[in-house]
Image (spheres, rainbow, N blue to C red):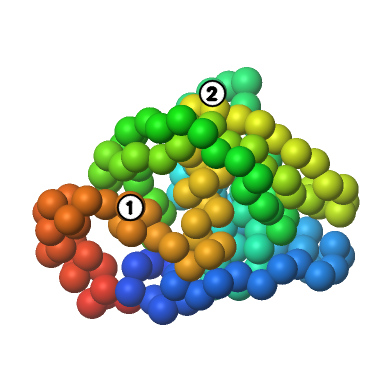
């Protein structure tokens, strides 16, 4: 197993914009393997490369923790093509341990990405998978889930954010 440490809020790398993947090689497969092992150990639903300190446009989503019919999905150089609707749902983030907040996001998404073999695919999704895709995509753009918080919600977690920042 090649799990990595998850980058915690306060580390400036989380605000960096990730760079496109240029080569679909062994290094990319190793990165996805490390993401997978790290996500499984953390028991999360999704993880982006930047969350393990790698500024590449790669993320994974694995909803099998909450839905036995789901399996690991790999998104390389993703582009969000469309979103629609609106839903409020409680989110957490592995880079913000212990912080959960209801936030609004579109409840449908259409995404184009590459798989591990360099094959392009498109996926239209709704519900939890749409939310997870948008959450992880935000990470690639240097955007964090706290950026979606209302001013009131942000003030409620201000102390926790300070502690996380101080510990990083």
Among numbered discs 2 and 1, the one appearing first in the sequence? 2
Secondary-structure class at tag 2: loop
Residue under circle 1? 148
**Vertical placement of 39 versus 85: above or below?**
below
Quarter of the image for the C terminus: give it.
Answer: bottom left
Residue 131 placed where, x, y %? 48, 38
Say few, some or many: other residues with alpha carbon within 10 Å of mark 1 (under 14 / 14 to 19 / 20 or more): some
Q: Nearer the viewer, residue 124 or 67?
A: 124
- Residue 9 vs residue 19: left or right? left
Q: Nearer the viewer, mark 2 or mark 1?
A: 1
Secondary-structure class at tag 1: helix
Q: Nearer the viewer, residue 143 or 51?
A: 143
Q: For residue 122, what is the image quadrant?
A: top right
Residue under circle 2? 67
**Vertical placement of 15 versus 97: above or below?**
below
Q: Can residue 1 be seen in this view?
A: no
Look at 86% across and 54% down and name the residue there: 118
Residue 32 placed where, x, y %? 70, 56
């Amino acid at each position: 197993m090649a799990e990595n440490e998850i980058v915690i809020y306060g580390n400036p790398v989380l605000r960096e914009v990730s760079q496109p993947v240029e080569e679909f090689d062994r290094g990319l497969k190793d990165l996805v393997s490390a993401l997978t092992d790290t996500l499984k150990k953390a028991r999360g639903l999704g993880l982006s490369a930047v969350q393990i300190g790698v500024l590449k446009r790669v993320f994974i989503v694995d909803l099998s923790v909450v839905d036995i019919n789901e399996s690991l999905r790999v998104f390389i150089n993703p582009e969000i093509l469309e979103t629609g609707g609106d839903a409020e749902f409680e989110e957490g983030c592995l880079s913000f341990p212990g912080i959960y907040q209801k936030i609004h996001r579109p409840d449908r998404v259409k995404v184009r990405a590459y798989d591990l073999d360099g094959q392009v695919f498109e996926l239209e999704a709704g519900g939890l998978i749409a939310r997870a895709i948008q959450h992880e995509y935000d990470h690639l753009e240097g955007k964090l889930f706290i950026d979606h918080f209302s001013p009131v919600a942000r003030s409620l977690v201000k102390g926790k954010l300070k502690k996380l920042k101080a510990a990083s």
